[in-house]
Image (cartoon, grey):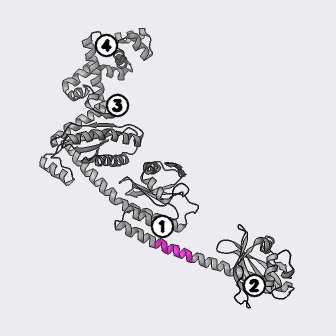
Amino acid sequence: MGSIMSIDAVHGFAYVMCRYDPTLLGKPLSDRWELATSPAVIALTRNEPVYIRDARESEEFPGYRREAFERDYRTVLVVPMSCLDDEGRPMVMSVISRHLKDVSEDELAFIGLIVHLGEIAVEKQHRLLEERRAGERLQSALEGHTSFLNQALSGAPVASLAAAIERLLPNPLVVVDFSTNSVVAGRSPSQAHFDDEAWRGAVDTALHRPLIKAARAALDQPREAPETLVLESGPHRLLVAPKIEPLTVDGEAVGALMIFPTQREFSDLDLLLLESARFALSVQLMRSFVRFRFETRTLSELFREIVERRWRDVEDVLQRAQRLGLNLANPRQMLVVELPSGAGDPRWSAVDLHHVAARLMEQNGLSAATLVHESSLVCLVACEDARAAGRLDKVLPRLASEVTRYFGQPPIVLLSERCASVTDYATAWERCRRRIRIAQSFGSTGVLSNQDFGPLPMLVTAADAADVRSFVQESVGVIAAHDREHGTPYLETLCTYLREGCRSQACANALDLHVTTLRYRLTRIQELFGIDVETPERRFAVELAIHLHDVINLDAR
């Protein structure tokens, strides 16, 4: 008789894998042995057979002693095997005799040969099983590749394609679509922090923006090792370092595939599947990318023609706008959002702002067309009645808050006058740009109105006149030119002197000068340029010239 057992040292048991007994009459036998009562551990530790001449009299192995009476056998030989079972556990073979048997060297050699042949057979079976599994994985990879492409080409939703990819890959995935500002999540990367449903809910809410920002940051500044992200949602706080793969169309990133780590490493077939998944997702995201870019670019081109006055036929402009879903025959106002400096890639910023603005307009029941022009996002908002104007006033601070939270810096947000006809847009746009330049020169941000600027918008409008520019040049332009040529600080000294109310000591303190030095500079300014600020009229003229000089120079830049 005989049997082959697997040894599970972690749990302390030996399991019978197969048994041979020609006289067994269907009597139920135990298939699990405690290692404490089995010689298998000794055989494996010593790597040599364990011989029990009479199991019925063995005090060392009570399990064999009990079974020897139940199954009527005497001598037992336990031989270690140099192979592992399917679960990686070591194996032993036991040979049992019903009679007392002395084992000779030749018999031990013969049994060793049988064990060696068994080891060869087991290893061969392992290889065959591995080849069969590899073939199945290859077939699965090919089917997955075909399935990915079919779904992408058939226009299936990104969520459906992402779910199909995750079923074939070992790691949890998140797909980020920059064009639609959406994030699609599958399995949770950590069941200890989120179950699958809670993870998807968190990705749709609290984790939506952090994941998009992390994806863009990783593509903007690639690193050799994945960066650790801190993902917080309510009481849950997860530290994870996903690998972020770009999804591109014509060399331009349209999204990202975030792969969260697991204990299992990617195999070659997994990498092949991953490449197929990236390609299929890129094809799928290309649709939204092309649609978004076509809509915004076409509308932006039309708006550029209008504000640059490059159109000739009003009816043609109205018809083109109508085809793009924009009715310019009705009065509209321009809501202009100037991106803060250092806002990152302007293409991605524009995409984000587009979605933010569209969501706020929809929530407040406003009809608007959104486009990108120069460094600003422009919403052409229909202003049909007073109620719409009131809702629009509520949107402005919320939009400024959203942009501030996203970029960490406040933008400039302002509203133009009503544009009743196509010709009104160019004038309104020029006024908006001038107000933005004034706000930038004074460091103003947030929601701004005409009252925030005082008389400067009117002065800036007049600054285009030749006589105004001549007045500015003759007043302070020559001082600025002299300072540039000779490295003198005369214009700065004059500005500070006026800002401090023409008080010599206060001005000297502000410039960190001695009062005598300040008076010398003021004397030189009067001698060289004829500037006299001792009378209120002259002082006002110089201050006005300085303000207009700053605005004109900023406008030129």
Q: Which residues are magenta?
A: 132-142
Q: Determine whether, in the image, residue 411 is placed left or right of residue 320.
A: right
Disc on res. 528: 4
Q: Is residue 144 above or below residue 198?
A: below
Q: Give the alpha-carbon distance from disc 2 to disc 3, as whole Å.
A: 90 Å
Q: Give the alpha-carbon distance from disc 2 to disc 4, as whole Å.
A: 117 Å
Q: Position of residue 377 (x, y in %)?
A: 30, 43
Question: Can residue 324 be seen?
Answer: yes
Disc on res. 167: 1
Give the mark, 2 or 4, whose residue is nearer the N terminus.
2
Q: Is residue 499 above or below residue 337?
A: above
User: Is most of the magenta stretch helix, strand or loop?
Assistant: helix
Q: Determine whether, in the image, residue 19 is placed left or right of residue 452.
A: right
At horizontal 13% and vertical 46% (from top left) the residue drawn is 314
Give the mark, 3 or 1, whose residue is nearer the N terminus.
1
Q: Nearer the viewer, mark 3 or mark 1?
A: 1
Kind of residue indicated by mark 4: Leu
Q: Is residue 271 above or below residue 98?
A: above
At horizontal 19% and vertical 50% (from top left) the residue drawn is 321
The N terminus: image quadrant: bottom right
- Residue under label 2, please give it: 2
